[in-house]
Image: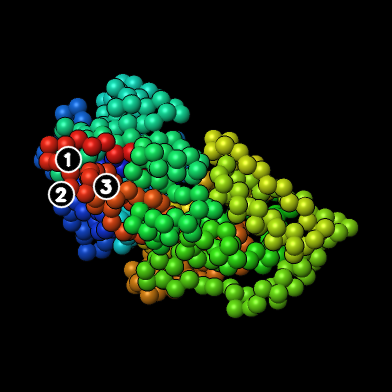
Amino acid sequence: MTDGRVESNIFRDLFEGLLVYGPDGRLLPGVAESWDVSEDGLTYSFHLRANAKWSNGDPITADDFIYSLRRAVAPHGGPAAANLRLIEKADAVMAGTAPPTQLGVTATDPATLRIRLSTPAPYFLALLSSDNMALPVHRASVEANGDRWTEPGKLVSNGAYTLAEWQRGKPLVVTRNPNYYAKDSVSIDRVVFHPVADPDEEMKLYRAGLLHVTNEVPQEQVKWISLSQPKEFWNKPYLATYYYALNLTAEPFKGNPTLRKALSLAINRQTIVEKVTRAGEMPAYGLVPPVVPNYRRPLPAYVAEPMERRLEDARRLFADAGYGPSQPLKLEILYNTSDNNDAIATAVRSQWETAFGKGLIVTTVSVDRTEYLKRRARRDFQVVRAAWIGDIADPTAFLNLMLSTAQPPRNDPGYHNAKYDALLAKAAATIDTPERAKLLVEAERMMVDDVPVLPIYHFATKSLVSTQVKGWTFNIRDVHPSRFLSIGDPTPPPSTANKTAAAF
């Protein structure tokens, strides 16, 4: 299981679900070549391809998906399985009060899978195409190898690629799956994923011709790259939000919304996107990005006010919260090591210290990704850098993060508001699109007023994509499975066109 973007890219190459997210964002048939939905929107019947096989040649059946979905929502499945709560009895199975056999998944025959939902969800098909927990796993190899089933030589997958090489800290290599049902449409034979966290190092590898695609580019080079490499710089709106989460389970934020509001007011988001990130990002005042269709984000009233007025209000609230030069507040901002994260943390610290003077002492702490994830999971922070990439273009992809039942890395703050939960539950049971949107807007406005998080900006992609890469198409999730891409010179020789290795 994973919530990470890089890991998800690997999973998409190795495994395939019932549906897949196409290059331009449209839903395409995956293992299921067709499907039917009941009139009440609760029952989905998926008809599997007759030629769908595992990488070892075993046929893929409905029982494989039943086993995998039951395994995903079992109590050990953890927070990553939250999206599957839509399935009937999933909540009870996750809580351990019902056996996995009661989950609403059945097989009418080996080639037909039926999924029953607890409430209608128009976005369920999109969720199946994007949620890693909805991917099938090969039962025999999982049970035979235990925790080692994911190792090269043991991993049996069903996607366009199979795992060839992987050691911690070294490049991960996948190669074309000869048993994939659409193998003839797969152009790239070999894909290499490099474990590089530093954008500067990515740039070096890219310039040396060792990468065809970067995850991002160094913050300070965005302007120069956009001007000098316009055909390679991929800078588009993105279904993601960057924010700081506040630990509401401990002081100083527990039971102190006044302090939380003061800190939020003092952040000049416009300055951050114009002077720090500089890649077309938009200031964020809530969690849901503006690219989500059929949804109008609720903006706080202070957005229309000049920054000086906001700072006046922030200082007043800060004092009302009990802090000032005679009783300064000490805060720590935690983030995973990255020049970009460091630049944003430095900007926020500067803005806070300018606003509150000697009343606030801010320390920024950078740790490696492993330590960062561990500290987030146990809420060992005051303020932590977070970001969320929507797995579907629906407001709930972001609003569900703050449900009381959600656990880190979703509900990092430990936010609990029964009215908020009730609004999302009501929206989940509402089929009428305008009425559902109205309920979701009300929920987000309530959450924003409570300030469990400090939204900073909505992302724009800032990757370098070599002109050798063909098939790289815009979609708001910035998802580009290798099976839809090809690599080569502008006019590659026919004899070598399908033998080029792609590196990411």
Residue 324 location, x and y as percent?
83, 61
Which residue position is annotated with label 2? 33
Type of residue at label 2?
Answer: Glu
Compute the Cα span from label 1 to label 2.
Answer: 29 Å
| The N terminus - image quarter | top left
User: Which of disc 3 and disc 1 is earlier in sequence?
Assistant: 3
Q: What secondary structure is found at the residue carrying circle 1?
A: loop
What number is the disc on residue 497? 1
Pointer 3 local density, CA inside 10 Å: few below 14, some 14–19, many at least 20: some
| Vertical order, 499 against 269 (above or below) | above
Quick one: which residue is furthest to the front in this view? 228
Which residue position is annotated with label 3? 468
Query: What is the quadrant of residue 261 in the picture?
Result: bottom right
Looking at the image, can residue 428 be seen?
no
Q: What secondary structure is found at the residue carrying circle 2?
A: strand
Pointer 2 local density, CA inside 10 Å: few below 14, some 14–19, many at least 20: some
